[in-house]
Image: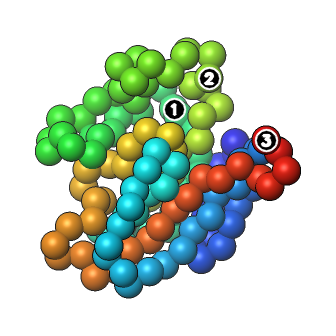
């Protein structure tokens, strides 16, 4: 995973196995899962960036109003092995982590009653790489 801009709409090869797809939608009916994130487009600052974790990175996981966690502590509580963390992809906007694929979005970018524009991100296995 190298730092690179995520085209919306568009797709990006994350690794030899994973593809990140990005779409815009006006539909606010959402079905999030570990590998599908719905973000309120109006709450995002700047473009979307694919990145990996930096020392001391923090984020506020969906469901915790104001409690920021170190990403390392979050992963420990979620059971992600240390060896997998260094190259795990993250999505940032305006320098902040807004989605950790396979886990959660950041609380402040969630879709809510005021949302009018949605960005849907999906991390998919490349076809034929099962």
Q: Is residue 65 above or below residue 112?
A: above
| Residue 1 horizontal/vertical position (percent) | 69, 42
Depth-wise, is mark 1 or mark 2 nearer the camera?
Answer: 2
Sort mark 2 into few (<14), some (14-19) or many (20+) by Cα contacts within 10 Å: few
Q: Evaluate whether residue 102 shows in this view.
A: yes
Residue position marked by numbered label 1 in the rendering: 54
Q: In this view, does 21 lie to the left or right of 71?
A: right
| Residue 121 horizontal/vertical position (percent) | 52, 62
Sort mark 1 into few (<14), some (14-19) or many (20+) by Cα contacts within 10 Å: few
Residue 28 picture quarter:
bottom left
- Report the disc number at residue 130: 3
Q: How far apart are marks 3 and 1 (CA)?
A: 30 Å
Q: What element carries label 2?
A: helix
Q: Do tag 1 and tag 2 residues touch (Cβ < 8 Å)?
A: no
Residue position marked by numbered label 2 in the rendering: 84
Depth-wise, is mark 3 or mark 1 nearer the camera?
Answer: 3
Mark 3 or mark 2, which is nearer the start of the sequence?
A: 2
Between 1 and 105, the one nearer to me in the picture: 105
Q: How far apart are marks 2 and 3 (CA)?
A: 19 Å
């Amino acid at each position: 995973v190298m730092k690179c801009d995520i085209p919306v709409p568009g797709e990006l090869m994350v690794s030899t196995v994973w593809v990140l797809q990005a779409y815009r939608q006006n539909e606010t009916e959402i079905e999030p899962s570990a590998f599908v994130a719905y973000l309120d487009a109006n709450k995002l600052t700047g473009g979307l960036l694919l990145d990996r974790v930096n020392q001391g990175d923090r984020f506020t996981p969906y469901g915790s109003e104001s409690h920021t966690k170190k990403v390392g502590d979050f992963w420990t509580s979620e059971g992600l092995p240390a060896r997998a963390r260094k190259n795990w992809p993250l999505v940032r906007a305006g320098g902040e982590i807004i989605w950790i694929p396979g886990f959660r979005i950041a609380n402040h970018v969630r879709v809510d009653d005021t949302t009018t524009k949605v960005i849907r991100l999906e991390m998919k296995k490349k076809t034929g790489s099962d």
